[in-house]
Amino acid sequence: MRLYESAEKAKITVISGPFGAGKTNVAVNIALDLAMHGKKCRVADLDTVNPYFRSADNKQMLEELGIQTLIPEFANTNVDIPAMPLNYNLIFTGEGRSIVDVGGDADGAAVLGVSHDDYIKAGYSMYFVYNRFRPLSADPDDALELMFGIQRACGLNFCGIINNSNLGAETAKEHIELSRAAAETLAEKAGIPIIFTTSPDYLDIPGTVKIKNVTKKLF
């Protein structure tokens, strides 16, 4: 599967999962692939939990490629407080596809519940981003509990898993291969499929989808 194909199943693609799984990187890469294939889309930054890694960091790059960005008014300012984008409703009514980047865990997913009926009406696909190398979700049972917590918080259900297991710039082929069994166990327990497994764009690994690292560096 190509990245953009994961966003063609419904009007709205929701990217959620535990803190540090790489949700923002996945969301932005999906939008980039949509634009590359001539698809009109937008990225909505609904991360009200973590102000350090968010889709708003890529606003200029995305808009230069014709990708609309819906970001909180004060994102990346000295008053970066939890808030919704002013043009939030375009997620449901705007032309083309919407990619929604949601903050980690149940607290972050609660923002989806505010517009639960709108997501149902517009049509959505929600993907759980799994990273085998993050302590809180390394074990499939722990990841499954987080998944259930997110679903309870927002009232929406996951339809697939994106295996985004990585160690940042230190990611090697063996790390990706090591993650597959855990991701498959999680998928079996959750009763939903693995949509794709990602790999850094500098690696050539059969059966994976390459993504760029577009998250900002802290130092």
Image (cartoon, helix red, strand yellow):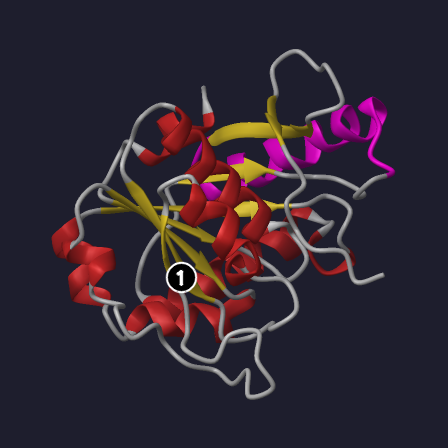
- Helix, strand or loop: magenta stretch: helix
101 with respect to 24 (left or right): left
Q: Which residue extends farthest top?
A: 206
Q: Of residues 162 and 136, which is closer to you in this image? A: 162
The answer to if 191 sits in the magenta stretch is: yes
The number of numbered discs placed on residues in the rendered structure image is: 1
Q: Of residues 139 and 172, which is closer to you in this image? A: 172
Quadrant showing the N terminus: top left
Residue 207: image x %, image y %? 60, 15
The structure residue drawn at horizontal position 63% and vertical position 45%, both measured from the top left corner, is 214
The structure residue drawn at horizontal position 81% and vertical position 31%, both measured from the top left corner, is 175
Quadrant showing the C terminus: bottom right
- Check the image and report above or below for 126 versus 56: above
Q: Which residue extends farthest bottom?
A: 79
Q: Which residue in the protein does label 1 denote?
A: 151
- Check the image and report above or below for 14 versus 200: below
Residue 17: image x %, image y %? 54, 55
Q: Of residues 53 and 8, which is closer to you in this image? A: 53
The structure residue drawn at horizontal position 14% and vertical position 56%, both measured from the top left corner, is 93
Res. 39 image quadrant: top left
The answer to if 206 sits in the magenta stretch is: no
> Judging from the image, what secondary structure is the residue with disc 1 in?
helix
Range shown magenta: 170-193
Residue 75: image x %, image y %? 51, 74
- Check the image and report above or below for 117 versus 110: above
66 with respect to 2 (left or right): left
Residue 3: image x %, image y %? 46, 28
The structure residue drawn at horizontal position 17% and vertical position 45%, both measured from the top left corner, is 95
Residue type at mark 1 is: Gln
Q: Of residues 125 and 211, which is closer to you in this image? A: 211
